[in-house]
Image: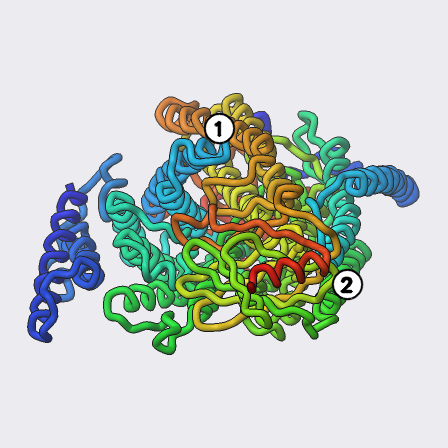
Amino acid sequence: MSRYSSKAGRPLHDVVAFRIVSGGEQESNTRNRLVVVGVAWLIATVLGWWAVTAYDWHPFGASREARITDEAFDLLMLMAVPIATFVLVVIGYSLLRDRDRGQDVDGPPIRTNRTFVVGWLAVTTILSIVVIITPGFSGLDELRAYPEPDLVIDVKGERWSWEYTYAESGVQTRGTLMVPIDTRIMFRISSTDVIHSFWIPAFRIKMDAVPGIITTTMVTAEKLGTFESADELRVQCAELCGVGHARMWTGVSVVTEAEFDAWLEASAG
Amino acid sequence: MNIVRGLIGGAVGYILGAALLMTIRVATGARAWEVESVSAGAWMFALIGWLLAVGVWRYWAREWFGLELVPYTTTGWRRYLDFDTDHKVIGIQYLVKFLTMFFMAGLFAMLMRYELMDNGEALLDSGRYNAIMSLHGTMMVFVAVAATVGAFGNFVVPIMIGADDMAFPRLNALSFWLIPPVLIALTVSFVSGGYDTGWTGYAPLSVESDVGGLFFNLAFFTLGLSSIIGALNIIVTVVTMRAKGMNWMRLPIFVWSIFVTSILSLIFTQFIALAMLMVVLDRTAGMVFFDPASGGDPLLYQHIFWFYSHPAVYIMILPAFGITLEIISHFSRKPLFGYKWAVGGLLGIMGMSMFVWAHHMFTSGMAEALRKPFLASTELISIPTGMIFLSAVGTLWLGKIRLELPMLFALAVLFNFLIGGITGVFLADVPVDIQLQDTYFVVAHLHYVVLGGGIFGLFAAIYYWFPKMTGRMMNDRLGKIHFWWMMVGFNVTFLPMFIVGLQGMNRRVADYTPDLVGTNRVISMAGFFLGTSFVVFLYNFIYSWIKGAKAPANPWGARTLEWQVPSPPPHENFEVPPIILADPYGYGEPDSDHADLGIGTLPKIQETVEA
């Protein structure tokens, strides 16, 4: 039935051969393997870096927060490439070189390797700590850097529509969300029924609208645009809230401060 | 026969429970019939009625009252339909039950992908889409949580540790027979209109959902009961029933993974049961745990829910890690590299999984100060996860690799989980997560972990242990077709989901922006391709079980104990209790033997041990 002997753990000739090979020959063999793997890893990593930087991962971004978030993503991508290529290259090399081609033999009884284990643990630990510090903590600090708003907008989620109230002027709308460019804006978000989530893809901001509490998030728009020019400029509900969830969105328009003031005045009047 | 009896018992239990509750309701001045309040309470009576009638009374409970037990006389294939206490029968019961659930949930996925081929509502309106999506998620989570542990934790673990059965065989049967009511509750839920909350069932949406939502809560609650009992049984079995000489550092890594998984289940499943129960009480008794207008807190639900549901991710993936390492060692013909580090990785993941749950809630409105600690703990969990990869990579290196079917699936687990794990690092980064939370990026990530890792691991286990379970070989050619079909289908389906997520498609929607139609068509086509791959598997699975070539005791030449007994193993597994001499990974070590089976294979070693 099987192509292999069923007797467990039979040590066979090439294992014995492995053991009696002189130390020097074995070392140079190992060295050759490591050189090939190292070169392949280097090539794969460079190609990987080229690919992930050539590809445009991000949709239209129109805010300061979008820059921070996209930079964090790109940095993580650069860090991910060598890790992924290392694992794939080592496994791939083993799959190509270390196959049993019908010999029906056991491999060498290597149970551990101090250098490899210590190196692996050191690298994974350092990498984990690095990603915590940057882009993790550093990105969070950047997002929180300017906590004083120039403009406050109250957002109310309600199945299945959004209502925006401009705090100072009292202007209210259920239509397009108008925001001025280069202005620090704070959204105060609430819900009257179930949980919704206030998400503007082009701004890379998202915060749940939770009944009973007011949550906040801040943004500074840096590019002009409307939903018609880029559909990432929309407020989209991102937390399942029932049958109208997918359609619970409105457009967002980023306009100049002069245009914004004019709009506000017209709406208030 | 006993299933019919069980259904009648369940119905009687329901009626009795309903009568009792309605009496209480009338006595306290409420309207007698109110479907949710009455059903929620009566469900517990129905469960007891079902269990008693399905076999607990005949084979177990009678002796509590001094009555003679009914002798167990069922033989042949009918044992798989009866309240059987043999761990091998129960393992196969679990496998078949959860594979059925897997294929049903897979069909729901096909419906979803059909709907998503175009923007706008084509086949399903949003209401129906939400119901199908919720049921798909729920059933797949149930499969991922319980299939591997139930099927292989039961069938293989006792043999691997040299035991004749589980510690509590009757409790084991009971935990399996709690599963059919789960499926019944989900069916009732679906027939009564389903629920539109997703498997996460966030309050207050879930409190307000239709009656289908109640049966979702009851189904999850019941599955939790089964998980807790099953986990307890496995923990006691591994602690107390290991053969002589099977000390902790000789335990096969798969047993370790199931053991660690069971500890997580035992500790954390009660929290999901609690979350479900609180929603039920909110719905039926007006307890307003989650209603802010009356002092409740919607975020409370999410904390309790994720306090279970994040460890649950590891309940889904750790058995797959165990299978992967097990298979990689046997099919590389090399000792498991860094065994202690692999065990340490499993234990490290177990310990740290308790401190990461709120990374699901970075945008939930929880206190800002919690973001950094949960970001840090989540990124740190990649260290013990890395140890699993360390062990796998080190074992493959210089091995004599045999690319048999189980090995292909094990390697696929590594490949898929590599992508799933690395994208997890992205999602743990709060600035990135703020954008990607609740988008298809998360959908892709979770499918890479749960389907690419957990379910590929389940299939590795099926191909690996099928000869042992059935005594027959699976068709190799069909198996390889299935593997490549599934692997290609899986990756072409889920890799583009990362892209549509990045492009701004949120999850759990039947409708999306028009610019994403093209990519979604590709995903749907690949999804159908992936779906059809299981037709090959099913045909192979059923055909081989009936007509496959007879399997030898040890077709893979593996060293663990289950391969040293006949296929399928006899009742109580071993002729005499085996004595364990070393760990099972002594490949290439001339004088190493895992065990003395006491049947004349290793007389000399036995003498030395006894001397």
**What's the coloring here?**
rainbow
**Quarter of the figure with residue B60:** bottom left
Q: Which quadrant: the N terminus of chain B? A: top left
Say above or below: B484 vs B71. above
Residue at x 13%, y 57% (from the top left corner)? B13
Can residue B542 be seen in this snapshot?
Answer: yes
Could you classify mark 1 by the number of other residues whose Cα lies within 10 Å: few (under 14), some (14-19), or many (20 or more)?
some
Q: Which residue is more in the foreground, A19 or B347?
A: B347
On the rendered structure, is B190 left or right of B496?
Answer: left
Q: Which residue is mark 2?
A: A134
Marks counted in the figure total 2
Label 1 sits on a secondary structure element that is helix
Q: Which quadrant: the C terminus of chain B? A: bottom right
Residue at x 88%, y 39% (from the top left corner)? A39
Q: Which residue is mark 1?
A: B528
On the rendered structure, is A52 left or right of B306?
Answer: right
**Quarter of the figure with residue B599:** top left
Q: Which residue is more in the foreground, B438 or B445?
A: B438
